[in-house]
Amino acid sequence: MDTMHLKKLLDACFTAKHVIETMPELPTGMKPRHIHVLDQISMAWETHGECRISDVSEGLNITMPSVTKLAQELEAMYLLEKYPDNADKRVTLLKLTEQGLSCVKKYVSDFHREWAGNLSSVSNEEVQNMISIIEQLEQTMPKHTRHSQ
């Protein structure tokens, strides 16, 4: 890739960031990160029939203390419940409330279904290629420019 095309690619990433930042308004007090956590919990339940804090941490690539804090915030909003694992009381499990499930449906499932329908001309292969390129961008970013996570 030449530098002109890299610049165009980075400009497109900036545009993508802007698109994400201008998504539908969330309820008062909710942040996009809350929706990501709720979605991750929902996906873990669909896959494993339960969700541990570590599942969210691994799925979103964020620290366990960050997930714990977000889970506390979501619990205070009555969007999830925390409870100990029967087999290992040291493990905290997370489960969405009806209100949490409703948030995932509205802000993830329904929203993504409608948006994907508007992108029917984009193939799954093109999307996969784009994801691969973005992952390569992250992996090859010069070390001195990376922000600490």
Image: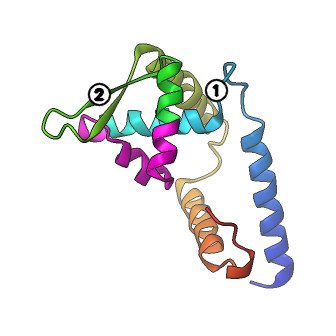
Q: Quadrant of residue 80?
A: top left
Relative side of 141 to 124, left or right: right
Mark 2: few, some, or many residues within 10 Å (few <14, many ≥20)? few
Mark 2 and mark 1: span between their CA atoms?
22 Å
Highlighted magenta segment, given as a residue range: 47-69
Amino acid found under the numbered disc labelled 2: Tyr
Residue at the far front in the pictured view: 90
Q: Give above or below for 84 relative to 54.
A: above
Residue that carries the numbered disc 2 in the rendered image:
83
Relative side of 58 to 122, left or right: left
Q: Give above or below for 54 relative to 73.
A: below
Q: Nearer the viewer, residue 73 or 138?
A: 73
Q: Nearer the viewer, residue 80 or 15?
A: 80
Residue that carries the numbered disc 1 in the rendered image:
30
In percent of width and height, residue 77 lies at 53, 18
Image point (79%, 66%), residue name: 10
Label 1: element kind:
loop
Image point (59%, 75%), residue name: 139
State the quadrant of the N terminus: bottom right
Label 2: element kind:
strand
